[in-house]
Structure formats: structure tokens, C-alpha cells
Amino acid sequence: MDRWWNEVAAFIDTGHGNAKSEGINRVIKFVARAVSGFRNATDQRLRTRCVTTRRARGHLRTAQL
């Protein structure tokens, strides 16, 4: 607990954690494993970017566009 006290205190003070960034990192790693068959790095980056955008994750409805 002593080792992580600064992070715990920051969460208590602000109410914010790093869950969102950890979730996005998890998705990026998952996609990186799935797209390992792409032949070039540009296609891999495009696929990762598409999967991690809000629209692709279903946050926006078609009618709101």
C-alpha cells in the first residue's frame, strides 16, 4: 500500500483513474494480435485506429450522425 499511496490519494482526490486508458490499451493489444497477418504496418495502424474510435465501439447511433 505504501508503494501505491500517491496513486490511491490521487484517485481519492479526483475520483478519476486510468481505467479508460487501460481498456483502450487492452483493445489495441487484442487487435494487434488479430491483425498480425496484414502485410504492412500502415494497415495494422489503420485497423487499430478504426477499432478504438468511439463510432466503431458503438457510442454513436446512426441517427445522431
Image (tube, rainbow, N blue to C red):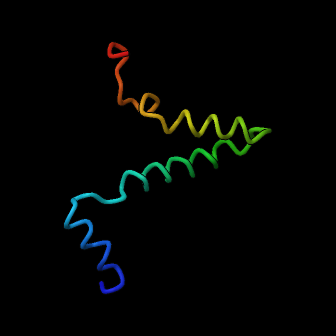
Position of 55 with respect to 17 (left or right) is: right
Which residue is at 46% across, 48% downward? 24
Give the image location of residue 5, x and y in percent.
29, 79
Q: Quadrant of the C terminus?
A: top left
> 55 above or below 1?
above
Give the image location of residue 10, x and y in percent.
27, 68
Give the image location of residue 27, x and y in percent.
50, 47
Position of 49 with respect to 14 (left or right) is: right
Give the image location of residue 59, x and y in percent.
35, 30
Which residue is at 57% across, 52% downward? 29
Residue projecting furthest to the bottom? 2
Residue projecting furthest to the right? 39
Q: How many marks?
A: 0
Which residue is nearer to you in this view: 29 or 20? 20
Which residue is nearer to you in this view: 13 or 18? 13
Position of 56 with respect to 1 (left or right) is: right
> 5 above or below 33?
below
Examine the image and state in which quarter residue 2 appears: bottom left
Q: Quadrant of the N terminus?
A: bottom left
> 14 above or below 57?
below
Which residue is at 39% across, 29% downward? 58
Which residue is at 31% across, 60% downward? 17
